Amino acid sequence: MAEINLFKFEKFFFSIIDFIFHPIFIPFYSLYTIIHLYSQYFLFNSQSIYYLLIAFFIITILLPLLVFLILRYYTLLFSSVKMNSKTERLLSVLIMQLFYVFAYFYFTDISFFYFIEILFTAFPLILAFLLILQIAFYKISMHTYAIGSFLGIILFYRFQYGIIAQFYLLSLIFIFIGLITSSRLLSGVHNFKEVLIGFFSGFFVAFVCMLSLA
């Protein structure tokens, strides 16, 4: 798909959207959102939740980014931060997968509520399916796969446990879906097929994985 000529402000805006909703951040947003939703029903130890989120952020975001930077600048395995080649995309997913497997073993040794523990098990599975899809298809959108999985997780808690997200939260999610989809299409990074496959496969995989673990 050819890149559409955008104004500088539009390019800057969509680059911000791509960064904020980069796939590496979405699981953290998912965990934070689920804790937020359950805080309506449970009284959490705020210090424990704080340390949980910090540890999760370090393991699943900071450490993978550090590995990526090392590989990018010292081994040249990544030609750019955009990861245009299939090998680079597969390697990036594999790096994230390894850290989520580590996070699973790290956090399952600590006693948490069941609705949090299920996420630690689901995240590596969702990434494993993304790895398979990246092998099967040349270049599905990881951004839309991630936001689709986010929606699948939210709806799982709605239908399985009756945890209803506030109207403003659902509205924001659908607005973000539209922005992310528009960004990937207008920038010419993905075509319509790659965006759709990414979103619906992410949604389906996340919902089914969560349901199978419940």
Image (spheres, helix red, strand yellow):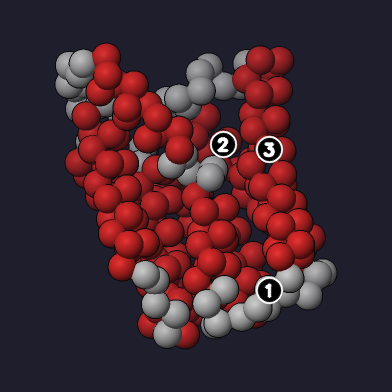
Instruction: Please tell me which of labels 2 and 1 falls first in the chain.
Output: 1
The residue wearing badge 2 is: 92
Relative side of 66 to 194, left or right: right
Between 179 and 47, the residue placed more toward the observer is 47
Q: Which residue is mark 1?
A: 44
28 relative to 113, above or below: above
Chain-order first, disc 2 or disc 3: 3
Instruction: State if disc 1 and disc 2 touch (CB < 8 Å).
Output: no
**Image x and y of residue 49, in percent:** 70, 63
Element type at mark 2: helix
- Secondary structure under the numbered disc 3 in the rendered image: helix
Image position of 100 with respect to 9: above or below = below
With 133 as the anchor, is 96 left or right in this view?
Answer: right
Residue 126 seen anywhere in this rendered image of the structure? no
Which residue is nearer to you in this view: 105 or 178?
178
Say the numbered circle drawn on residue 62: 3
Q: Residue flagged by tag 3: what amino acid is it?
A: Leu
- Residue in the foreground of this view, choosing between 190 and 50: 50
Residue pushed farthest right? 109
Is the Cβ of the residue at disc 1 closer than 8 Å to that at disc 3? Answer: no
Q: Quadrant of residue 19?
A: top left
Q: Residue at x 39, y 34 (%)?
A: 18
